[in-house]
Amino acid sequence: MSYTAARARGTGSAVETPMSDSVPCDLDQKKDARSPVAANKSQGSLELVREMLFMPIPAHGICTFRMMFGVVMFMQTAKFGDVFTKFKETSMVFPYGGLGYFPPVNPEVGDALLLLLASSSICTMLGLFTRLSCVLNFVLFTYVFHICESNHNNHYILFCHVTFATIWLDWGTCLSVDSYLRTKVYPEISRKIRGRPTDVRSSDAVICQLPTVPWWQVFMMQILFNIPYFYGAIAKMNYDWIFRAQPPKLWFSRREGWMFEQWWFPWFIAWGGTAFDLGISFVLWYKPTRYILGFPNAIFFHCMNKYMFNIGVFPIVMTCALVLFVEPIAVSRFWAAVRNDRTALLLVNNWEDRAREGTHRAAAAADADVDADGDADVEGADEHIPKTSKRPRMRMRQASTMVFLSMLAIFHALFPLRHFVLYPDSPSWTEEGHHGAWHMMLRTKRGWGLLEAVDDTGDRMVIDPTRDPTLNDRQTRKVVQRPHMLLLYIAHLQKVYKAAGRKLDTVHVHSCFTLNARPLQRYYVDTANALDYVGKYESLGTTLVGKWIEPLASISSPVPMSLQCEENLHQASAQLIQGSAVNPRHKFLRLLREAGLAWEEGPVLHNRSQFAYTLYEYPRNSAISSSSLVY
């Protein structure tokens, strides 16, 4: 396929168009119609930023990434395949703070949403209904991800940000079904409807050029994919990671193989990972080091991550994002060579020649004036090109784009750092300010937690949330380790008591945890009534450290007596239930039955002594229903 660019009336956008034999592609015509404009030396910095952001660049780079991202989105959707199946096994979900207003749909509707998400991912890859598929990707993926905190993964947050950004991209400009329909099928249909041949010269201006997008679109995507690197490096600059090589030492102590047995390997991962995250963004942006250092190191880093940790599709999408840093014209040349398109190669050569002459920025300024004043034909184009130093007027769309980019930059610059200002203790311990701060794989937290619940009659019950048969296995692994999830579970427990005809008065949490192989200590303040803090976790500027969460003890001194705890869960449980005539496990199960919940025992979980359970029905004639238990 050869290329032309047809300026649509009132838009001035360039699209990929099949060449007509009757209208040869005259490369010199491009130069005559778009004479270079001398840059105004006196223009302000805002005008220079505008020119840079809206400078047209070849679209093949970002469109190539579109195809790769569509494939990765489909892979991620496949990994989400059992999300709603898991929800069948639980009586509640754990929504993120402030996002509990969107209850989960039933499993049948959920599976249909996942199918729709898979379809929109394929459409994104093909470039079919590109804008609509991007909107669906963002809405559906963000919804499924935020239903339950037990499914949390840092790279899912990256997907939410990226899918939102893609809504505003013109990455269906080429290498897409949309561009083929727009430039070949629709004109042919129009010709048949009108009953006469289409004259491409009848458009306002027909000039030969590569399909382009504004530079800000590629720059925005580069920023988004560099954020996990840079802020990940800031997060790694903590005592455990830098001076103790923890938790890498814990991870590799359980691995077999020569590499994992070397004393220096955890230190290499800790220090090397920090150096890589801190420097890779600048190495990729600096052209002399991009291909020599940036690409080989990035590929090696992500291959190692995939091999050692198997962290889903994150290494794949970050590797695919490297195409965003390749010179766009080089990607255009690649596709022209793949298709053996001589005309396209000539257009690439012409673009490179004009780039060396430094005329692209001046042509962008001329475009702004032409589009602001109206359409221009080829013969009269010179009349619309400014001959003086008069500044082109900034259009409303450009101003809106600049405001949007500024707000996006401010959010991504400040939000990951909020825990430094709002929450004093380590987010790896308290989890306050952890989400969205790019603290990736920086904590290994182990321990136990038991709830001591007392109702209005004075009846006391000891509850182990990890053995709650109405939670699924993903939830039981995290419910005690994450303070926010535990508060949600306690709020859920209130509803269970109410459904059983009781009133829950107090809940005290007894716990013993270790973070990154530190000495064991209490996690929760066992004298505090957890009911007083339900709905107050990570409120703006309000920390629960010292109120319901114990501060992290210094590793340089022994754990204070007030924070010391019993390591053995069975001994701690025996002390709490001392004097009770009823088995606490049977007592808790009876409470659940009184609340109308039913379950069945399943297989033993891997590396755990507890049973997994599947909630298979909600009695319709009881005082409690599935909707009333979903928090």
Image (cartoon, grey):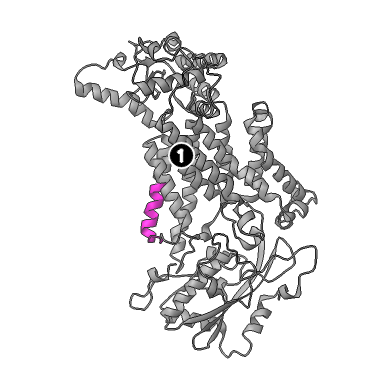
User: x, y (%) of residue 228?
Assistant: 60, 45
Q: Is residue 415 above or below residue 608?
A: above
**Looking at the figure, which quarter contains the C terminus?**
bottom left
Q: Nearer the viewer, residue 500 or 507?
A: 507
Q: Is residue 554 left or right of residue 368?
A: right
User: x, y (%) of residue 345?
Assistant: 49, 16
Q: Residue 108: say if magenta.
A: yes
Q: Residue 541: say if magenta.
A: no
How many labels, in total?
Answer: 1
Q: Is residue 515 left or right of residue 85?
A: right
Q: Residues within 10 Å of mark 1 (few under 14, many from 20)?
A: many
- Identity, as a three-letter code, of the amino acid under mark 1: Thr
From the image, give the main secondary structure of the stretch colored magenta. helix
Q: Is residue 62 above or below residue 242?
A: above
User: x, y (%) of residue 149?
Assistant: 52, 60
Q: Find residue 15 and report its image quarter.
A: top left
The answer to whether one can see residue 549 in this image is yes
Numbered range of the magenta stretch: 103-117
Q: Residue at x 37, y 23 (%)?
A: 372
Q: Which residue is mark 1?
A: 166
Q: Residue at x 38, y 22 (%)?
A: 371
Q: Find residue 486 and report its image quarter.
A: bottom right
Q: Is residue 453 above or below residue 486?
A: below
Element marked by disc 1: helix
User: x, y (%) of residue 593?
Assistant: 44, 80
